[in-house]
Image: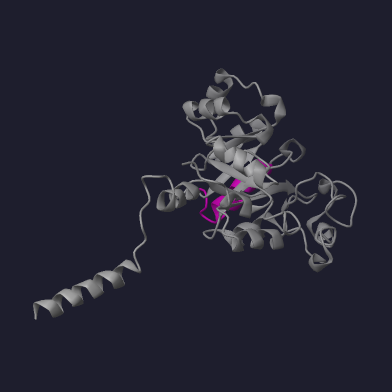
Amino acid sequence: MIRKITILSLTVMIFASMFTVPAFASNGSGTQAVQQQKKMVNIAHRGASGHAPENTMAAFEKAFEMKADYIEIDVQMTKDGELIAIHDTTVNRTTNGTGSVGGYTLEEIQQLDAGSWFGQEFAGEQIPTFEEVIDTYRGKIGLLIELKSPELYPGVEEKVAEALMERNMHKPNNEKIIIQSFNHASVQQSKALLQNIPHGVLAGTSWANVTDEQLAQFTTFADFFNPNMSIVTDELVDRVHIAGMKIYPYTVRTQEQANNLFERNVDGIITDFPEYVYRHPVKN
């Protein structure tokens, strides 16, 4: 009888071990490695724009399918005051049209082909409205909203705030909405309107020598300092963290660039290729 119980116990132990995930915390591999990878916030730049035409629903849907943490959206305004997702201040590069974004009405701009330039399989993709994007992805994926050249569109901060408030998205409880801009005065204005939404300042290469005093000033209205990846150093990352902000550099387009930023201990990576952020090496 004792022998039967022993054999049964041994069988149960072997069976259970087949479904147990081992913990490799001691050497920085296995479970700990997965945990470290999950800490890196993965932001799909203009959607998964390495795979589909930027700032289109196709690019946003691809980012969602690839399980990015956020999609980054560039927001501008049409001549008739409608919010749309497009990066350049002209339609020349990413559509079959010409001229400034603000010179088109919504109806006119949505007649343009925003996909063929990237590939014929995307022919007919439209420039989506901001409302279309947030209605489709609210609660499904994070939204990093960039106010693009807001100085060209007086009142754009209020328009964005109104769209979010109408949907009760101005009090997020999961920090899955962030607003940012290169125009720091616009960030301040937006923060005053949407006090419960985290905001970020975008920083080009001219901010390579940002001072501690400047970072401290940013903290009065911003939660993120998101610089061009070319100016990111260990020292900069440390100083941003000491100031109390997070840092999401842009724009990664190679695996090597992603790996370099991961080694710098940044908090997230803005990338055209979400798969590069998932494949970064983990420190031992």
Q: What colour scheme was applied to this rendering of the protein?
A: one colour
Residue 212, image x, y percentages: 55, 19
Q: Nearer the viewer, residue 260 or 109?
A: 260
Residue 9, image x, y percentages: 19, 73
Q: Residue at x 58, y 52 (%)?
A: 279
- Can residue 171 be seen in this snapshot? no
Q: Quadrant of residue 51?
A: bottom right
Q: Is residue 273 magenta?
A: no
Q: Nearer the viewer, residue 104 or 220?
A: 220
Q: Residue furthest left?
A: 1
- Can residue 51 be seen in this snapshot? yes
Q: Split into 4 quadrants, where in the image is the N terminus?
A: bottom left
Q: Residue at x 82, y 62 (%)?
A: 119
Work out whether 246 lies above or below 36: above
> How many numbered marks have been drawn onto this rendered protein structure?
0
Magenta-highlighted residues = 156-170
Q: Nearer the viewer, residue 210 or 130?
A: 210
Q: Quadrant of residue 11?
A: bottom left
Residue 226, image x, y percentages: 61, 36
In the drawing, does residue 144 fall left or right of residue 126?
left
Residue 117, image x, y percentages: 85, 58
Q: Residue furthest front?
A: 3
Q: Residue at x 72, y 54 (%)?
A: 50
Q: Is residue 164 magenta?
A: yes
Q: Main secondary structure of the magenta part?
A: helix
Work out whether 48 lies above or below 210: below
Q: Quadrant of residue 231?
A: top right
In the drawing, does residue 213 fall left or right of residue 29?
right
